[in-house]
Image (cartoon, helix red, strand yellow):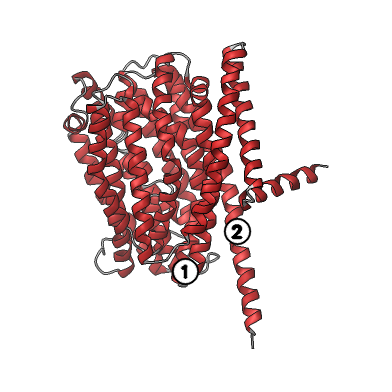
Amino acid sequence: MNTSGEKNSGAITDNNSKSMSVLKAAWIIAVVTIISKLIGFIRDIIIANYYGATLVSDAYYYAYQIPSLSLILLGGVGGPFHSATVAVFSKLIPNLQEKPEEAVNKLYSTFMTATTIFFLVLSVIMFVFPRQIMGLIISSGSADMINLAAEHLKIMTPLLIIGGIVGIYYGILIIYKQFMLPNLSPIIMSAAIIGVVMAVPNDNKGYALAWATTIGAILQLIIQYPNVRKLGFKWRPNFEFTNNPNFKEIMELLFPAVLSSTVGQIHIYVDMFFTSSISEGAWTAIGYANRVFQFPVGILVTAFLVPLFPIFSRLVAEKDLDGIKTYFNKGVGVLFFAAIPIIIGILTVGMDAVRLIFERGVFDANATFMVTEALWFLSVSILPYVFRDSITRVYYSFNDSKTPFIVAFSSIVLKYLLNVIFISKMHMGIGGITLSTSLVTLFNACVLGSLIYKKVRMDYKGLFTNLLKMSIAGVISLILCFGLAYGFDKFIHMPKALFEIIKITSVGILCLVSYTGLNLIFKMEYAYELAQRFMRKINAGK
Protein backbone atom coordinates (compact mmCIF):
# COMPACT_ATOMS: atom_id res chain seq x y z
CA MET A 1 0.00 0.00 0.00
CA ASN A 2 1.43 3.43 -1.02
CA THR A 3 1.86 6.13 1.56
CA SER A 4 1.03 9.77 0.79
CA GLY A 5 4.77 10.50 0.78
CA GLU A 6 5.32 7.85 -1.88
CA LYS A 7 2.48 9.34 -3.93
CA ASN A 8 3.92 12.82 -3.65
CA SER A 9 7.35 11.50 -4.58
CA GLY A 10 5.87 9.81 -7.62
CA ALA A 11 4.03 12.97 -8.61
CA ILE A 12 7.20 15.04 -8.30
CA THR A 13 9.13 12.52 -10.39
CA ASP A 14 6.38 12.54 -13.02
CA ASN A 15 6.32 16.35 -13.13
CA ASN A 16 10.11 16.51 -13.41
CA SER A 17 9.99 13.95 -16.20
CA LYS A 18 7.36 15.99 -18.05
CA SER A 19 9.36 19.17 -17.52
CA MET A 20 12.54 17.61 -18.92
CA SER A 21 10.56 16.16 -21.85
CA VAL A 22 9.10 19.58 -22.66
CA LEU A 23 12.51 21.29 -22.45
CA LYS A 24 14.12 18.63 -24.63
CA ALA A 25 11.35 18.91 -27.21
CA ALA A 26 11.54 22.70 -27.04
CA TRP A 27 15.26 22.67 -27.81
CA ILE A 28 14.78 20.25 -30.73
CA ILE A 29 11.96 22.33 -32.17
CA ALA A 30 13.91 25.55 -31.62
CA VAL A 31 16.92 24.24 -33.54
CA VAL A 32 14.79 22.88 -36.38
CA THR A 33 12.70 26.05 -36.52
CA ILE A 34 15.84 28.20 -36.62
CA ILE A 35 17.08 26.21 -39.61
CA SER A 36 13.71 26.56 -41.32
CA LYS A 37 13.53 30.28 -40.56
CA LEU A 38 17.08 30.86 -41.81
CA ILE A 39 16.30 29.21 -45.13
CA GLY A 40 13.06 31.19 -45.24
CA PHE A 41 15.13 34.32 -44.73
CA ILE A 42 17.40 33.35 -47.60
CA ARG A 43 14.26 32.89 -49.71
CA ASP A 44 13.01 36.36 -48.77
CA ILE A 45 16.42 37.91 -49.50
CA ILE A 46 16.42 36.37 -52.97
CA ILE A 47 12.83 37.45 -53.66
CA ALA A 48 13.68 40.97 -52.48
CA ASN A 49 16.76 41.03 -54.69
CA TYR A 50 14.83 40.11 -57.84
CA TYR A 51 11.47 41.80 -57.17
CA GLY A 52 12.17 44.50 -54.56
CA ALA A 53 9.14 46.30 -53.10
CA THR A 54 7.27 46.82 -56.37
CA LEU A 55 3.92 46.27 -58.06
CA VAL A 56 4.91 42.70 -58.99
CA SER A 57 5.91 41.77 -55.44
CA ASP A 58 2.77 43.44 -54.09
CA ALA A 59 0.60 41.44 -56.53
CA TYR A 60 2.21 38.18 -55.43
CA TYR A 61 1.90 38.89 -51.71
CA TYR A 62 -1.67 40.18 -52.06
CA ALA A 63 -2.66 36.99 -53.90
CA TYR A 64 -0.72 34.71 -51.55
CA GLN A 65 -2.65 35.97 -48.52
CA ILE A 66 -5.76 34.06 -49.63
CA PRO A 67 -4.42 30.48 -50.04
CA SER A 68 -1.99 31.07 -47.17
CA LEU A 69 -5.06 31.11 -44.93
CA SER A 70 -5.21 27.35 -45.46
CA LEU A 71 -1.52 26.49 -45.74
CA ILE A 72 -0.16 28.55 -42.85
CA LEU A 73 -2.96 29.71 -40.53
CA LEU A 74 -5.33 26.73 -40.70
CA GLY A 75 -2.92 23.93 -41.58
CA GLY A 76 0.35 25.15 -40.11
CA VAL A 77 1.94 24.03 -36.85
CA GLY A 78 -0.29 25.45 -34.11
CA GLY A 79 -3.17 26.02 -36.53
CA PRO A 80 -6.75 24.74 -36.02
CA PHE A 81 -6.32 21.48 -38.00
CA HIS A 82 -3.12 20.62 -36.15
CA SER A 83 -4.62 21.65 -32.79
CA ALA A 84 -7.91 19.78 -33.31
CA THR A 85 -6.02 16.64 -34.36
CA VAL A 86 -3.81 16.76 -31.26
CA ALA A 87 -6.69 17.56 -28.88
CA VAL A 88 -8.89 14.65 -30.00
CA PHE A 89 -6.52 11.96 -31.30
CA SER A 90 -4.09 12.22 -28.34
CA LYS A 91 -6.91 11.02 -26.06
CA LEU A 92 -7.69 8.07 -28.37
CA ILE A 93 -4.08 6.85 -28.68
CA PRO A 94 -2.94 5.88 -25.14
CA ASN A 95 -0.03 3.74 -26.37
CA LEU A 96 2.22 5.44 -28.91
CA GLN A 97 4.17 2.21 -29.46
CA GLU A 98 1.22 0.44 -31.11
CA LYS A 99 -0.60 0.98 -34.39
CA PRO A 100 -3.84 2.98 -34.12
CA GLU A 101 -7.03 0.99 -33.59
CA GLU A 102 -9.53 0.57 -36.42
CA ALA A 103 -11.86 3.16 -34.88
CA VAL A 104 -9.03 5.72 -34.81
CA ASN A 105 -8.19 5.00 -38.45
CA LYS A 106 -11.84 5.37 -39.38
CA LEU A 107 -11.96 8.75 -37.65
CA TYR A 108 -8.80 9.76 -39.50
CA SER A 109 -10.35 8.80 -42.86
CA THR A 110 -13.54 10.68 -42.09
CA PHE A 111 -11.61 13.80 -41.10
CA MET A 112 -9.43 13.64 -44.23
CA THR A 113 -12.44 13.14 -46.50
CA ALA A 114 -14.38 16.06 -45.04
CA THR A 115 -11.32 18.32 -45.22
CA THR A 116 -10.64 17.48 -48.87
CA ILE A 117 -14.25 18.07 -49.95
CA PHE A 118 -14.49 21.39 -48.13
CA PHE A 119 -11.29 22.86 -49.55
CA LEU A 120 -11.95 21.45 -53.03
CA VAL A 121 -15.16 23.48 -53.22
CA LEU A 122 -13.32 26.62 -52.09
CA SER A 123 -10.55 25.97 -54.61
CA VAL A 124 -13.01 25.80 -57.52
CA ILE A 125 -14.57 29.11 -56.45
CA MET A 126 -11.15 30.73 -56.16
CA PHE A 127 -10.03 29.46 -59.57
CA VAL A 128 -13.18 30.60 -61.37
CA PHE A 129 -13.51 34.06 -59.77
CA PRO A 130 -9.97 35.34 -59.02
CA ARG A 131 -10.52 38.80 -60.55
CA GLN A 132 -13.65 39.40 -58.50
CA ILE A 133 -11.98 38.22 -55.28
CA MET A 134 -8.90 40.42 -55.68
CA GLY A 135 -11.00 43.38 -56.85
CA LEU A 136 -13.01 43.17 -53.64
CA ILE A 137 -10.02 42.97 -51.29
CA ILE A 138 -7.70 45.54 -52.91
CA SER A 139 -10.33 47.77 -54.48
CA SER A 140 -8.09 50.82 -54.00
CA GLY A 141 -5.34 49.24 -56.11
CA SER A 142 -4.75 49.93 -59.80
CA ALA A 143 -6.30 47.78 -62.54
CA ASP A 144 -2.86 46.39 -63.39
CA MET A 145 -2.33 45.41 -59.77
CA ILE A 146 -5.70 43.67 -59.49
CA ASN A 147 -5.32 41.79 -62.79
CA LEU A 148 -1.80 40.59 -61.97
CA ALA A 149 -2.81 39.51 -58.46
CA ALA A 150 -5.75 37.57 -59.95
CA GLU A 151 -3.40 35.59 -62.22
CA HIS A 152 -1.15 34.77 -59.26
CA LEU A 153 -4.19 33.65 -57.27
CA LYS A 154 -5.25 31.16 -59.97
CA ILE A 155 -1.79 29.61 -60.02
CA MET A 156 -1.75 29.16 -56.22
CA THR A 157 -5.25 27.63 -55.96
CA PRO A 158 -3.99 24.11 -54.95
CA LEU A 159 -2.59 25.54 -51.71
CA LEU A 160 -6.10 25.57 -50.26
CA ILE A 161 -6.54 21.78 -50.39
CA ILE A 162 -2.96 21.05 -49.37
CA GLY A 163 -3.13 23.24 -46.26
CA GLY A 164 -5.87 21.32 -44.45
CA ILE A 165 -4.34 17.91 -45.18
CA VAL A 166 -0.87 19.02 -44.07
CA GLY A 167 -2.38 20.33 -40.81
CA ILE A 168 -3.81 16.89 -40.02
CA TYR A 169 -0.46 15.27 -40.85
CA TYR A 170 1.30 17.72 -38.51
CA GLY A 171 -1.05 16.84 -35.67
CA ILE A 172 -0.57 13.08 -36.09
CA LEU A 173 3.22 13.35 -36.21
CA ILE A 174 3.39 15.60 -33.14
CA ILE A 175 1.19 13.21 -31.12
CA TYR A 176 3.84 10.57 -31.82
CA LYS A 177 6.55 13.04 -30.73
CA GLN A 178 7.93 13.40 -34.25
CA PHE A 179 8.57 17.12 -33.87
CA MET A 180 11.32 17.48 -36.45
CA LEU A 181 9.56 16.74 -39.76
CA PRO A 182 6.60 19.14 -39.32
CA ASN A 183 8.98 21.97 -38.50
CA LEU A 184 11.41 21.07 -41.29
CA SER A 185 8.89 20.65 -44.11
CA PRO A 186 8.46 24.42 -44.78
CA ILE A 187 12.08 24.29 -45.96
CA ILE A 188 10.79 22.41 -49.01
CA MET A 189 8.65 25.34 -50.11
CA SER A 190 11.48 27.81 -49.48
CA ALA A 191 13.90 25.65 -51.46
CA ALA A 192 11.46 25.40 -54.38
CA ILE A 193 11.01 29.17 -54.47
CA ILE A 194 14.76 29.81 -54.27
CA GLY A 195 15.48 27.35 -57.06
CA VAL A 196 12.79 28.57 -59.46
CA VAL A 197 13.38 32.30 -58.89
CA MET A 198 17.11 31.93 -59.51
CA ALA A 199 16.46 29.73 -62.56
CA VAL A 200 14.02 32.27 -64.06
CA PRO A 201 15.64 35.66 -63.28
CA ASN A 202 13.72 37.69 -65.89
CA ASP A 203 10.27 37.00 -64.44
CA ASN A 204 8.63 40.37 -65.12
CA LYS A 205 5.15 39.25 -64.03
CA GLY A 206 6.09 37.10 -61.04
CA TYR A 207 4.40 33.99 -62.46
CA ALA A 208 7.47 31.84 -61.74
CA LEU A 209 7.26 32.92 -58.11
CA ALA A 210 3.61 31.83 -57.88
CA TRP A 211 4.32 28.48 -59.57
CA ALA A 212 7.28 27.86 -57.27
CA THR A 213 5.04 28.44 -54.25
CA THR A 214 2.54 25.87 -55.51
CA ILE A 215 5.23 23.31 -56.30
CA GLY A 216 6.75 23.81 -52.85
CA ALA A 217 3.40 23.21 -51.15
CA ILE A 218 2.87 19.98 -53.10
CA LEU A 219 6.33 18.75 -52.09
CA GLN A 220 5.55 19.69 -48.48
CA LEU A 221 2.56 17.35 -48.60
CA ILE A 222 4.48 14.53 -50.27
CA ILE A 223 7.29 14.54 -47.68
CA GLN A 224 4.83 14.15 -44.75
CA TYR A 225 2.84 11.27 -46.21
CA PRO A 226 5.27 8.31 -45.78
CA ASN A 227 5.75 8.91 -42.05
CA VAL A 228 2.02 9.22 -41.39
CA ARG A 229 1.35 5.99 -43.28
CA LYS A 230 4.22 4.24 -41.50
CA LEU A 231 2.54 5.04 -38.17
CA GLY A 232 -0.47 3.03 -39.37
CA PHE A 233 -2.79 5.79 -40.62
CA LYS A 234 -4.39 4.93 -43.95
CA TRP A 235 -6.85 7.20 -45.72
CA ARG A 236 -9.85 5.47 -47.25
CA PRO A 237 -12.66 7.86 -48.30
CA ASN A 238 -15.30 7.77 -45.58
CA PHE A 239 -18.49 9.83 -45.74
CA GLU A 240 -20.00 8.88 -42.37
CA PHE A 241 -19.93 12.43 -41.08
CA THR A 242 -22.90 12.11 -38.70
CA ASN A 243 -22.36 8.74 -36.98
CA ASN A 244 -19.00 9.28 -35.29
CA PRO A 245 -19.06 11.13 -31.93
CA ASN A 246 -15.31 11.74 -32.08
CA PHE A 247 -15.66 13.38 -35.50
CA LYS A 248 -18.41 15.53 -34.02
CA GLU A 249 -15.98 16.54 -31.25
CA ILE A 250 -13.37 17.48 -33.87
CA MET A 251 -15.92 19.62 -35.70
CA GLU A 252 -17.06 21.29 -32.48
CA LEU A 253 -13.46 22.23 -31.78
CA LEU A 254 -12.43 22.91 -35.37
CA PHE A 255 -15.33 25.00 -36.65
CA PRO A 256 -14.99 27.94 -34.26
CA ALA A 257 -11.17 27.66 -34.43
CA VAL A 258 -11.30 27.91 -38.24
CA LEU A 259 -13.68 30.82 -37.97
CA SER A 260 -11.34 32.42 -35.43
CA SER A 261 -8.35 32.05 -37.77
CA THR A 262 -10.47 33.30 -40.66
CA VAL A 263 -11.37 36.32 -38.58
CA GLY A 264 -7.65 36.89 -38.09
CA GLN A 265 -7.27 36.76 -41.85
CA ILE A 266 -10.08 39.29 -42.21
CA HIS A 267 -7.87 41.63 -40.17
CA ILE A 268 -5.21 41.13 -42.85
CA TYR A 269 -7.73 41.80 -45.61
CA VAL A 270 -8.71 45.01 -43.85
CA ASP A 271 -5.02 45.95 -43.82
CA MET A 272 -4.72 45.04 -47.51
CA PHE A 273 -7.66 47.31 -48.32
CA PHE A 274 -6.05 50.30 -46.59
CA THR A 275 -2.50 49.50 -47.72
CA SER A 276 -3.48 49.42 -51.40
CA SER A 277 -4.15 53.16 -51.12
CA ILE A 278 -0.77 54.06 -49.55
CA SER A 279 2.05 53.50 -52.05
CA GLU A 280 3.56 50.91 -54.37
CA GLY A 281 5.52 48.35 -52.40
CA ALA A 282 3.76 49.09 -49.10
CA TRP A 283 2.22 45.64 -48.73
CA THR A 284 5.52 43.97 -49.61
CA ALA A 285 7.25 46.10 -46.95
CA ILE A 286 4.71 45.08 -44.30
CA GLY A 287 5.21 41.45 -45.30
CA TYR A 288 8.98 41.66 -44.91
CA ALA A 289 8.59 43.44 -41.57
CA ASN A 290 6.36 40.63 -40.40
CA ARG A 291 8.94 38.06 -41.51
CA VAL A 292 11.70 39.79 -39.55
CA PHE A 293 9.31 39.94 -36.59
CA GLN A 294 8.32 36.28 -36.90
CA PHE A 295 11.89 35.01 -37.14
CA PRO A 296 12.72 35.32 -33.41
CA VAL A 297 9.16 35.45 -32.06
CA GLY A 298 8.00 32.49 -34.13
CA ILE A 299 10.92 30.41 -32.91
CA LEU A 300 10.07 31.20 -29.28
CA VAL A 301 6.35 30.50 -29.58
CA THR A 302 6.75 27.34 -31.66
CA ALA A 303 9.54 25.92 -29.50
CA PHE A 304 7.64 26.22 -26.22
CA LEU A 305 3.96 25.94 -27.14
CA VAL A 306 4.10 22.96 -29.51
CA PRO A 307 5.34 20.52 -26.81
CA LEU A 308 3.30 22.23 -24.07
CA PHE A 309 -0.07 21.93 -25.84
CA PRO A 310 -0.38 18.11 -25.55
CA ILE A 311 0.57 18.43 -21.87
CA PHE A 312 -2.14 21.06 -21.34
CA SER A 313 -4.66 18.69 -22.96
CA ARG A 314 -3.65 15.78 -20.72
CA LEU A 315 -3.68 17.97 -17.58
CA VAL A 316 -7.22 19.09 -18.44
CA ALA A 317 -8.26 15.46 -18.91
CA GLU A 318 -6.73 14.71 -15.48
CA LYS A 319 -8.43 17.83 -14.02
CA ASP A 320 -5.05 19.01 -12.75
CA LEU A 321 -5.72 22.77 -12.72
CA ASP A 322 -2.67 23.50 -10.56
CA GLY A 323 -0.51 21.78 -13.16
CA ILE A 324 -1.98 23.97 -15.90
CA LYS A 325 -1.22 27.13 -13.91
CA THR A 326 2.33 25.97 -13.18
CA TYR A 327 3.17 25.08 -16.78
CA PHE A 328 1.46 28.20 -18.14
CA ASN A 329 3.34 30.59 -15.84
CA LYS A 330 6.63 28.84 -16.49
CA GLY A 331 6.17 28.89 -20.26
CA VAL A 332 4.89 32.46 -20.54
CA GLY A 333 7.52 33.69 -18.07
CA VAL A 334 10.31 32.28 -20.22
CA LEU A 335 8.69 33.77 -23.34
CA PHE A 336 8.48 37.21 -21.69
CA PHE A 337 12.10 36.96 -20.54
CA ALA A 338 13.30 36.13 -24.06
CA ALA A 339 10.96 38.60 -25.82
CA ILE A 340 12.22 41.81 -24.19
CA PRO A 341 15.74 41.63 -25.73
CA ILE A 342 14.06 41.13 -29.12
CA ILE A 343 12.15 44.40 -28.64
CA ILE A 344 15.39 46.15 -27.66
CA GLY A 345 17.13 44.80 -30.75
CA ILE A 346 14.36 45.94 -33.11
CA LEU A 347 14.28 49.45 -31.65
CA THR A 348 18.06 49.96 -31.64
CA VAL A 349 19.41 48.11 -34.69
CA GLY A 350 16.24 47.17 -36.57
CA MET A 351 17.05 49.36 -39.56
CA ASP A 352 20.61 48.04 -39.67
CA ALA A 353 19.30 44.48 -39.71
CA VAL A 354 16.81 45.20 -42.49
CA ARG A 355 19.50 46.97 -44.53
CA LEU A 356 21.94 44.08 -44.05
CA ILE A 357 19.38 41.42 -44.92
CA PHE A 358 17.45 42.94 -47.82
CA GLU A 359 19.09 46.04 -49.33
CA ARG A 360 20.56 44.79 -52.61
CA GLY A 361 19.45 44.49 -56.22
CA VAL A 362 15.99 45.99 -56.78
CA PHE A 363 15.48 46.46 -53.01
CA ASP A 364 16.60 50.07 -52.35
CA ALA A 365 17.02 52.43 -49.36
CA ASN A 366 13.39 53.59 -49.56
CA ALA A 367 12.22 49.98 -49.25
CA THR A 368 14.52 49.55 -46.23
CA PHE A 369 12.91 52.53 -44.51
CA MET A 370 9.38 51.26 -45.24
CA VAL A 371 10.15 47.84 -43.77
CA THR A 372 11.83 49.35 -40.69
CA GLU A 373 8.95 51.74 -40.02
CA ALA A 374 6.50 48.84 -40.08
CA LEU A 375 8.79 46.75 -37.87
CA TRP A 376 9.18 49.42 -35.18
CA PHE A 377 5.44 49.67 -34.60
CA LEU A 378 5.03 45.90 -34.85
CA SER A 379 7.54 45.36 -32.03
CA VAL A 380 5.00 46.82 -29.59
CA SER A 381 2.97 43.63 -29.97
CA ILE A 382 5.61 41.07 -28.99
CA LEU A 383 4.67 40.68 -25.31
CA PRO A 384 0.88 40.54 -25.84
CA TYR A 385 1.50 38.29 -28.87
CA VAL A 386 3.25 35.55 -26.89
CA PHE A 387 0.71 35.84 -24.06
CA ARG A 388 -2.26 35.63 -26.45
CA ASP A 389 -0.90 32.56 -28.25
CA SER A 390 -0.14 30.85 -24.93
CA ILE A 391 -3.54 31.49 -23.34
CA THR A 392 -5.27 30.40 -26.56
CA ARG A 393 -3.65 26.94 -26.21
CA VAL A 394 -5.18 26.67 -22.74
CA TYR A 395 -8.63 27.36 -24.22
CA TYR A 396 -8.05 24.70 -26.88
CA SER A 397 -7.02 22.23 -24.17
CA PHE A 398 -10.47 22.71 -22.64
CA ASN A 399 -11.93 22.04 -26.12
CA ASP A 400 -13.03 25.67 -26.16
CA SER A 401 -12.26 27.40 -29.43
CA LYS A 402 -15.46 29.45 -29.31
CA THR A 403 -14.13 32.01 -26.85
CA PRO A 404 -11.00 32.88 -28.91
CA PHE A 405 -13.26 33.14 -31.95
CA ILE A 406 -15.70 35.54 -30.28
CA VAL A 407 -12.85 37.71 -29.01
CA ALA A 408 -11.16 37.77 -32.43
CA PHE A 409 -14.47 38.51 -34.16
CA SER A 410 -15.20 41.40 -31.83
CA SER A 411 -11.85 42.99 -32.67
CA ILE A 412 -12.59 43.32 -36.42
CA VAL A 413 -14.44 46.57 -35.87
CA LEU A 414 -11.62 47.81 -33.63
CA LYS A 415 -9.09 46.97 -36.35
CA TYR A 416 -11.08 48.86 -38.99
CA LEU A 417 -11.58 51.92 -36.76
CA LEU A 418 -7.89 52.05 -35.81
CA ASN A 419 -6.91 51.88 -39.49
CA VAL A 420 -9.32 54.71 -40.28
CA ILE A 421 -7.79 56.80 -37.49
CA PHE A 422 -4.13 56.04 -38.25
CA ILE A 423 -4.33 55.90 -42.08
CA SER A 424 -7.24 58.06 -43.22
CA LYS A 425 -7.17 60.68 -40.45
CA MET A 426 -3.59 60.82 -39.12
CA HIS A 427 -1.90 59.73 -42.39
CA MET A 428 0.65 57.57 -40.56
CA GLY A 429 1.15 55.33 -43.59
CA ILE A 430 2.72 51.91 -43.11
CA GLY A 431 3.41 52.55 -39.42
CA GLY A 432 -0.30 53.10 -38.84
CA ILE A 433 -1.13 49.66 -40.23
CA THR A 434 1.28 47.81 -37.94
CA LEU A 435 0.46 49.98 -34.91
CA SER A 436 -3.21 49.07 -35.25
CA THR A 437 -2.17 45.40 -35.45
CA SER A 438 -0.21 45.73 -32.21
CA LEU A 439 -3.10 47.40 -30.37
CA VAL A 440 -5.57 44.73 -31.54
CA THR A 441 -3.17 42.02 -30.33
CA LEU A 442 -3.03 43.73 -26.92
CA PHE A 443 -6.85 43.92 -26.82
CA ASN A 444 -7.22 40.20 -27.61
CA ALA A 445 -4.59 39.21 -25.04
CA CYS A 446 -6.27 41.21 -22.26
CA VAL A 447 -9.75 39.88 -22.97
CA LEU A 448 -8.67 36.24 -23.31
CA GLY A 449 -6.57 36.52 -20.16
CA SER A 450 -9.60 37.78 -18.24
CA LEU A 451 -12.15 35.27 -19.55
CA ILE A 452 -9.98 32.22 -18.77
CA TYR A 453 -10.89 32.73 -15.10
CA LYS A 454 -14.17 30.94 -15.85
CA LYS A 455 -12.14 27.74 -16.32
CA VAL A 456 -9.01 28.15 -14.19
CA ARG A 457 -7.88 30.93 -11.87
CA MET A 458 -4.48 31.79 -13.27
CA ASP A 459 -1.78 33.18 -10.98
CA TYR A 460 -1.16 36.43 -12.88
CA LYS A 461 0.23 38.29 -9.86
CA GLY A 462 3.51 36.39 -9.83
CA LEU A 463 3.73 36.40 -13.63
CA PHE A 464 3.28 40.14 -14.04
CA THR A 465 5.41 41.01 -11.01
CA ASN A 466 8.24 39.22 -12.78
CA LEU A 467 7.35 41.01 -16.03
CA LEU A 468 7.64 44.37 -14.25
CA LYS A 469 11.15 43.52 -13.02
CA MET A 470 12.15 42.29 -16.47
CA SER A 471 10.74 45.47 -18.05
CA ILE A 472 12.79 47.70 -15.73
CA ALA A 473 15.89 45.74 -16.69
CA GLY A 474 14.84 46.07 -20.32
CA VAL A 475 14.45 49.86 -20.19
CA ILE A 476 17.91 50.30 -18.64
CA SER A 477 19.40 47.95 -21.23
CA LEU A 478 17.58 49.83 -24.02
CA ILE A 479 19.15 53.13 -22.95
CA LEU A 480 22.62 51.56 -22.91
CA CYS A 481 22.08 50.00 -26.35
CA PHE A 482 20.78 53.26 -27.82
CA GLY A 483 23.95 54.96 -26.57
CA LEU A 484 26.20 52.35 -28.17
CA ALA A 485 24.26 52.44 -31.46
CA TYR A 486 24.51 56.25 -31.53
CA GLY A 487 28.26 56.02 -30.94
CA PHE A 488 28.66 53.65 -33.87
CA ASP A 489 26.69 55.93 -36.21
CA LYS A 490 28.63 59.05 -35.16
CA PHE A 491 32.20 57.83 -34.79
CA ILE A 492 32.69 54.57 -36.70
CA HIS A 493 33.31 54.60 -40.46
CA MET A 494 33.91 51.43 -42.47
CA PRO A 495 32.39 49.45 -45.41
CA LYS A 496 28.62 49.24 -45.04
CA ALA A 497 28.13 45.47 -44.68
CA LEU A 498 31.01 45.12 -42.20
CA PHE A 499 29.73 48.14 -40.25
CA GLU A 500 26.23 46.66 -39.96
CA ILE A 501 27.54 43.28 -38.81
CA ILE A 502 29.86 44.73 -36.15
CA LYS A 503 27.23 47.21 -34.93
CA ILE A 504 24.45 44.61 -34.66
CA THR A 505 26.79 42.13 -32.94
CA SER A 506 28.11 44.72 -30.47
CA VAL A 507 24.67 46.02 -29.55
CA GLY A 508 23.37 42.46 -29.27
CA ILE A 509 26.15 41.45 -26.86
CA LEU A 510 25.62 44.57 -24.74
CA CYS A 511 21.89 43.91 -24.67
CA LEU A 512 22.23 40.29 -23.55
CA VAL A 513 24.92 41.00 -20.95
CA SER A 514 23.25 44.07 -19.43
CA TYR A 515 19.73 42.60 -19.52
CA THR A 516 20.77 39.26 -18.02
CA GLY A 517 23.00 40.95 -15.44
CA LEU A 518 20.22 43.27 -14.30
CA ASN A 519 17.81 40.35 -14.02
CA LEU A 520 20.36 38.51 -11.90
CA ILE A 521 20.45 41.54 -9.61
CA PHE A 522 16.64 41.43 -9.49
CA LYS A 523 16.93 37.70 -8.61
CA MET A 524 14.90 36.52 -11.61
CA GLU A 525 14.84 32.71 -11.82
CA TYR A 526 15.03 32.76 -15.63
CA ALA A 527 18.31 34.68 -15.51
CA TYR A 528 19.73 32.28 -12.94
CA GLU A 529 18.78 29.28 -15.10
CA LEU A 530 20.39 30.92 -18.13
CA ALA A 531 23.57 31.74 -16.18
CA GLN A 532 23.77 28.22 -14.75
CA ARG A 533 23.32 26.67 -18.18
CA PHE A 534 26.07 28.95 -19.56
CA MET A 535 28.46 28.04 -16.73
CA ARG A 536 27.82 24.32 -17.26
CA LYS A 537 28.75 24.75 -20.92
CA ILE A 538 31.94 26.60 -19.90
CA ASN A 539 32.90 23.94 -17.35
CA ALA A 540 32.13 21.13 -19.78
CA GLY A 541 34.52 22.69 -22.29
CA LYS A 542 37.42 22.78 -19.83
Quarter in which the C terminus is drawn: top right
Does residue 349 appear to the left or right of 515 in the view shown?
Answer: left
Which residue is depicted at the point 42% across and 30% down? Answer: 375
Q: Residues within 10 Å of mark 1 (few under 14, many from 20)?
A: some
Mark 1 lies on a secondary structure that is helix
Q: Which mark is residue 21?
A: 2
* Residue 443 position in % (x across, y down): 33, 47
Amino acid type for the residue under numbered disc 2: Ser
Is residue 370 visible in the rendered image? The answer is yes
User: Which amino acid lies under the numbered mark 1 shown in the image of this protein?
Assistant: Leu
Viewer can see residue 200? no
Please give the label number shown on residue 321.
1
The N terminus is located in which quarter? Answer: bottom right
Along the line of sight, the residue nearer the viewer: 354 or 80 = 354
Q: At 45% from the left edge and 62% from the top edge, which residue is drawn?
A: 458
Judged from this view, the residue extending furthest toward the right is: 542
Left or right for 29, reference 116: right
Observer-nearest of 524 and 238:
524
61 to 474, vertically: above or below: above
Identify which residue, 486 or 293, lies in the foreground. 486
The relative height of residue 46 versus residue 477 in the rendered view (above or below) is above
Q: In the image as oriented, which residue stretches furthest toward the bottom?
A: 1
